[in-house]
Image (cartoon, grey):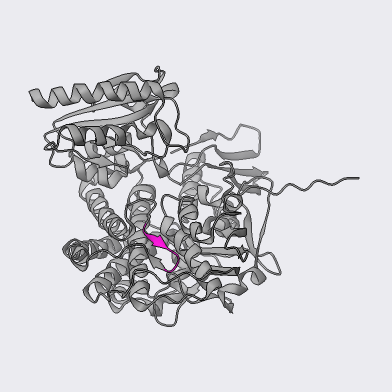
C-alpha cells in the first residue's frame, strides 16, 4: 500500500512508487491511498501481511531527506515519526492506532517511511527523495520476487 | 482533553480557561475565557489559522475554473464549494440543467453529507459524550460502534468517488453538469451497501438519541435554505426562524461580515442590528422538518425529535437524522435514476454577477462572483458556514460558562470544547485575508 498526494511535493513519493511497482509487478496486490482513514482501515482488513509506504517530514522526524526508515506498526516510535496527517489531523498513524483498537491490524505490518523535504503545493519529488524511491522500488521488486 | 488548564489560585478571584489548540475540529483555533470576581468577562474563539487568499486567487481566472479552485478550500466539504460556485455561474449565465443532472447533483451532495457527518458523529463528537479523549480510545471500549461508523463513512466515500471521480476533492463537477456520467450499473452496484448503511444510520439515530445532553437552550435565529419540495441541498430561498424569506441574490442585503481582532475568520451577522444567527444541521432541520422523507420523519418521532431543537448539544442526533435522510434519498435517486441526455449543458460566453448559496454539511455556504465579458472573474466573495456561526458559538460559550462556574476547571474546559464541536467548525474554510486600510494624514 502506498499513501500520498502527488500535488504536495515529496508527499507524492507514495504515488510515485505505486506507479513504478504497478509496472514492475503487474500481478502484485497493490493499493494506492490518499490517506483517508476509513479507506485505510478497510484496506487493512483481510491482510495477513502489509507493507505501507508513506512520506514523513524529514525535519519533524529528525531525519536527512531521502532517508528510509522501516518500522513495525507496533513500534512506539511510529507515533513520533511524523507521518503526514490529513484534514481533522487524522492520517496513517491514527488509522493504525484505530485499527489496533478495533483488532483489525494485519498480523505482519511494516511501515516504510521516506523522509521528504518539501510538502508545498507543487508536483515533483526532490532529488534525494527520488533517488531513495528508485532504490526502494528495486528492493521491493526483489523482495516480492523472493517472497 | 487538550489545552492547558490554569487553576484557580488561592486568594484570587480570576479564572481563565485557555485551550491553546482545539482538538477534533478542522483547522487551527483556540479558546479563551476570562472570569473575574465570579463574573464572566470575555469569551473569544480565536482562529489563528493563516489566511488562505482563495478569493484573491480567483481573480483573473476563467469562470469555469471556479468550481475546481474553490473545492480546494476544504477537504471535508469540497462538493459544497464546487456546487455553490457552479450554481452562482449558472445563475449568472441563465443555465438550467436537466432533471437528470439535478438528481445526480443531489446524489453527490448525499455522499458528502454522509462522509462529513459520519466522521464528525463517530470520530470527533461522540468521544465527548462518552468520556473518551478521542475515537482511538473510544474504539477499545466500543469497537462495534466505531466499525459501524467507518463502514457508513466508506459508503458515503463510494458515492463521491463514483460521481466525483475521487473521494476527496472531486474532479468531475463542472459548470453546466458533469464531465462524464458513470454507467448506471456502477450506481446500482452501490445499492446493497447503501441499504445496509441506511439501517446502520437508523441505529446511529437511536444510539445518539440515548446520549446525555448538557442542558443549554437558547433562542437562536436559525437560517437555512428552503425548497418547494425537497430537503435543502442547493436550491430554494433563504429563510429564517424569525421570518426572513429572501431569494439567494438578496443575501448581501441581509447579512454582513465584520472583522474582529482575535480571529482570522470574519464574523457574519444579520443586518441591520448586527445580531448573531445559526446555520447548519439544526437550522436546516428546524426549518425543513416537513421536507424530510417519511421514513426520516418516522424515525425522528421514535426518538422524540419531532420538535424544534434549541439545544446545540442535541445536534449530534440531528446530524444522525440527516445521515439517515441522505442514505434514504441516495437509494431513491439510484433506484429511480434519470439518466441525463448529455453530461453537461453548453456554457455560453458572457459575464455579469452570479450568486448562490448551498447547504454545506456545516450550513449555508454563499458565493458571489463578478465576471467580465471576457469570462474572467474580477471579484469573488465566499462566506463559509463557520464564519456565520462564530458569533453564535461565542455566545453559547458565554451562557454555558456563566451557568457552570461551579464546575472544576477540567470539567468546564471539556464542556466548552464539546460545545464548540456542536458546530463541527471548519476553521480552514473560515479564514480570510483581513483587509488592510492605510490612512494618510
* Circle count: 0
- Residue A71 seen by the camera: no
Q: In this rendering, does residue B251 appear at all?
A: yes
Q: Residue at image x 34%, y 64%?
A: B108
Position of B415 compared to B376: left or right? left
Q: In terms of depth relative to the viewer, which is nearer, B13 or A129? A: A129
- Of residues B358 and B282, the one nearer the viewer is B358
Residue A104 lies, in percent from the top left, at 17, 39
Q: Which residues are magenta?
A: B172-176
Please say whether residue B173 is one of the residues in the magenta stretch. Answer: yes
Q: Is residue A9 above or below residue B271?
A: above
The answer to whether residue B221 is above or below residue A51 is below
Instruction: Give the residue displayed 36% in from the left and 41% down from the top.
Output: B134
Vertical order, B384 against B47 (above or below) = below
Q: Residue furthest left?
A: A147
Q: Position of residue B54 (x, y in %)?
A: 56, 50
Give coordinates of residue B44: x percent, y percent: 62, 47
Q: Please give left or right for residue B264 compared with residue B310 in the image.
A: right
At 35% from the left and 52% from the top, the residue drawn is: B119
Along the line of sight, which residue is nearer the eye, B244 or A61? A61
| Quarter of the C terminus of chain B within the rendering | top right
Name the image quarter holding the N terminus of chain B: top left
What main secondary structure does the magenta stretch of the protein show? Answer: loop
Find residue B191 and report its horizontal and vertical position in percent. Answer: 19, 65
Amino acid at each position: 500500500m502506498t499513501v500520498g498526494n502527488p500535488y504536495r511535493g515529496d508527499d507524492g513519493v507514495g504515488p510515485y512508487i505505486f506507479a513504478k511497482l504497478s509496472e514492475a509487478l503487474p500481478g502484485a496486490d497493490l493499493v494506492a491511498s490518499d490517506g483517508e482513514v476509513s479507506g485505510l482501515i478497510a484496506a487493512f482488513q483481510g491482510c495477513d501481511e502489509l507493507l505501507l509506504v508513506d512520506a514523513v517530514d524529514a525535519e519533524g522526524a529528525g531525519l536527512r531527506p531521502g532517508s528510509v526508515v522501516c518500522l513495525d506498526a507496533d513500534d512506539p516510535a511510529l507515533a513520533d515519526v511524523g507521518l503526514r496527517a490529513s484534514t481533522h489531523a487524522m492520517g496513517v498513524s491514527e488509522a493504525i492506532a484505530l485499527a489496533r483498537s478495533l483488532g483489525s491490524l494485519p498480523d505482519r505490518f511494516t511501515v516504510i517511511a521516506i523522509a521528504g523535504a518539501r510538502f508545498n503545493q507543487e508536483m515533483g519529488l526532490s532529488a534525494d527523495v527520488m533517488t531513495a524511491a528508485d532504490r526502494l522500488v528495486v528492493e521491493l521488486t526483489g523482495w516480492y520476487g523472493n517472497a | 482533553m487538550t489545552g492547558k488548564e490554569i487553576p484557580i489560585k488561592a486568594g484570587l478571584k480570576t479564572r481563565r480557561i485557555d485551550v491553546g489548540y482545539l482538538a477534533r475540529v478542522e483547522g487551527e483555533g483556540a479558546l479563551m475565557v476570562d472570569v473575574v470576581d465570579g463574573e464572566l468577562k470575555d469569551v473569544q474563539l480565536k482562529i489563528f489559522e493563516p489566511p488562505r487568499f482563495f478569493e484573491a486567487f480567483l481573480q483573473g481566472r476563467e469562470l469555469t475554473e471556479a468550481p475546481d479552485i474553490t473545492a480546494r478550500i476544504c477537504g471535508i466539504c469540497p462538493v459544497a464549494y464546487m456546487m455553490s460556485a457552479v450554481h452562482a455561474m449558472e445563475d449568472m449565465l441563465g443555465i438550467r440543467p436537466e432533471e437528470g443532472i439535478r438528481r445526480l447533483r443531489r446524489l453527490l451532495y448525499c455522499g458528502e453529507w454522509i462522509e462529513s457527518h459520519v466522521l464528525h458523529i463517530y470520530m470527533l463528537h461522540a468521544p465527548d459524550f462518552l468520556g473518551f479523549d478521542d475515537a482511538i480510545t473510544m474504539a477499545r471500549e466500543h469497537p462495534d460502534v466505531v466499525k459501524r461508523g467507518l463502514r457508513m463513512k466508506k459508503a458515503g466515500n463510494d458515492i463521491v468517488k463514483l460521481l466525483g471521480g475521487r473521494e476527496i476533492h472531486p474532479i468531475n463537477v463542472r459548470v453546466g453538469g458533469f464531465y462524464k456520467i458513470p454507467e448506471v450499473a456502477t450506481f446500482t452496484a452501490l445499492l446493497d451497501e447503501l441499504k445496509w448503511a441506511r439501517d446502520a444510520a437508523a441505529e446511529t439515530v437511536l444510539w445518539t438519541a440515548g446520549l446525555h445532553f448538557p442542558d443549554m437552550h437558547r433562542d437562536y435565529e436559525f437560517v437555512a435554505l428552503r425548497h418547494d419540495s425537497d430537503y435543502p441541498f442547493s436550491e430554494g430561498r433563504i429563510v429564517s426562524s424569525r421570518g426572513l424569506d429572501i431569494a439567494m441574490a438578496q443575501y448581501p442585503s441581509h447579512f454582513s461580515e465584520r472583522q474582529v481582532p482575535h480571529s482570522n475568520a470574519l464574523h457574519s451577522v444579520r443586518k441591520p442590528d448586527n445580531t448573531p444567527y445559526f446555520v447548519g444541521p439544526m437550522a436546516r432541520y428546524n426549518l425543513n422538518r416537513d421536507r424530510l422523507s417519511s421514513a426520516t420523519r418516522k424515525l425522528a418521532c421514535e426518538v422524540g425529535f419531532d420538535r424544534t431543537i434549541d439545544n446545540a448539544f442535541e445536534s449530534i442526533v440531528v446530524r444522525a437524522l440527516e445521515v439517515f435522510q441522505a442514505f434514504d434519498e441516495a437509494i431513491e435517486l439510484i433506484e429511480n435514476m434519470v439518466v441525463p441526455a448529455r453530461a453537461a449543458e453548453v456554457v455560453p460566453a458572457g459575464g455579469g454577477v452570479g450568486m448562490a448559496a448551498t447547504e454545506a454539511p456545516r450550513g449555508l455556504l454563499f458565493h458571489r462572483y463578478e465576471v467580465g465579458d471576457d469570462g474572467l472573474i474580477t471579484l469573488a466573495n465566499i462566506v463559509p458556514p463557520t464564519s456565520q456561526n462564530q458569533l453564535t458559538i461565542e455566545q453559547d460559550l458565554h451562557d454555558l460558562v456563566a451557568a457552570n462556574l461551579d464546575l472544576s476547571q477540567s470539567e468546564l474546559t471539556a464542556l466548552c470544547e464539546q460545545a464548540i464541536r456542536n458546530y463541527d467548525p471548519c476553521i480552514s474554510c473560515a479564514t480570510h485575508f483581513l483587509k488592510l486600510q492605510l490612512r494618510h494624514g
